[in-house]
Image (cartoon, rainbow, N blue to C red):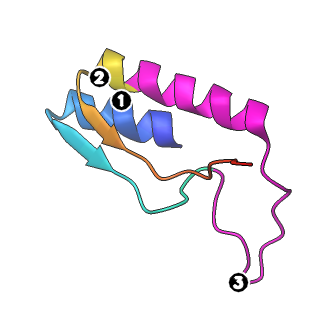
């Protein structure tokens, strides 16, 4: 959904797209069951979003989880 929104924003001439916090992978809690953070998934998501932003020639602000020690 994020890459589709980025592509559409680029087609419409946007220069910046800002998603809500924790858009990827989604909010934990509030009735949702989301698996624990997955480092490989996050790395892949970051790379895919960066590529979509480059193709659309715009800046993306996208909140995600970040795994730290």
Q: Residue at x 84, y 69 (%)?
A: 33
Q: Position of residue 54 (x, y in %)?
A: 33, 18
How far is the residue under mark 3 from the one under mark 1? Answer: 30 Å
Query: Is residue 50 found left or right of 10 in the rendered image?
Result: right
Q: Against 26, is 66 above or below?
A: above
Region of the chain picked out in magenta, as a range: 25-52
Q: Earlier in the sequence, mark 3 or mark 1?
A: 1
Asked if labels 1 and 3 touch by Cβ distance under 8 angstroms, the answer is no
Q: Residue at x 79, y 42 (%)?
A: 38
Q: Residue 32's image quarter?
A: bottom right
How far is the residue under mark 2 from the one under mark 3? Answer: 33 Å
Name the residue that disc number 3 marks: 30
How many dots with numbers?
3
Q: Callout 3 environment at 10 Å: few (<14), some (14 to 19), or many (20+)?
A: few
Q: Callout 2 environment at 10 Å: few (<14), some (14 to 19), or many (20+)?
A: many
Q: Of residues 12 and 24, which is closer to you in this image?
A: 24
Q: Residue at x 81, y 62 (%)?
A: 34
Name the residue that disc number 1 marks: 7
Q: Position of residue 7 (x, y in %)?
A: 36, 29
Is label 2 or label 3 in front? 3
In the rendered image, residue 62 lying in the magenta stretch gets the answer: no
Asked if labels 2 and 1 touch by Cβ distance under 8 angstroms, the answer is yes
* Label of residue 56 in the image: 2
Q: Residue 59's image quarter?
A: top left
Helix, strand or loop status at disc 1: helix
């Amino acid at each position: 959904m994020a890459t589709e929104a980025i592509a559409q924003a680029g087609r419409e001439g946007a220069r910046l797209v800002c998603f809500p916090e924790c858009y990827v992978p989604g909010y934990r809690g509030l009735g949702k069951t989301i698996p624990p953070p997955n480092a490989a998934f996050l790395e892949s998501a970051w790379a895919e979003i960066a590529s979509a932003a480059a193709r659309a020639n715009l800046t993306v602000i996208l909140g995600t989880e970040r795994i730290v020690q």
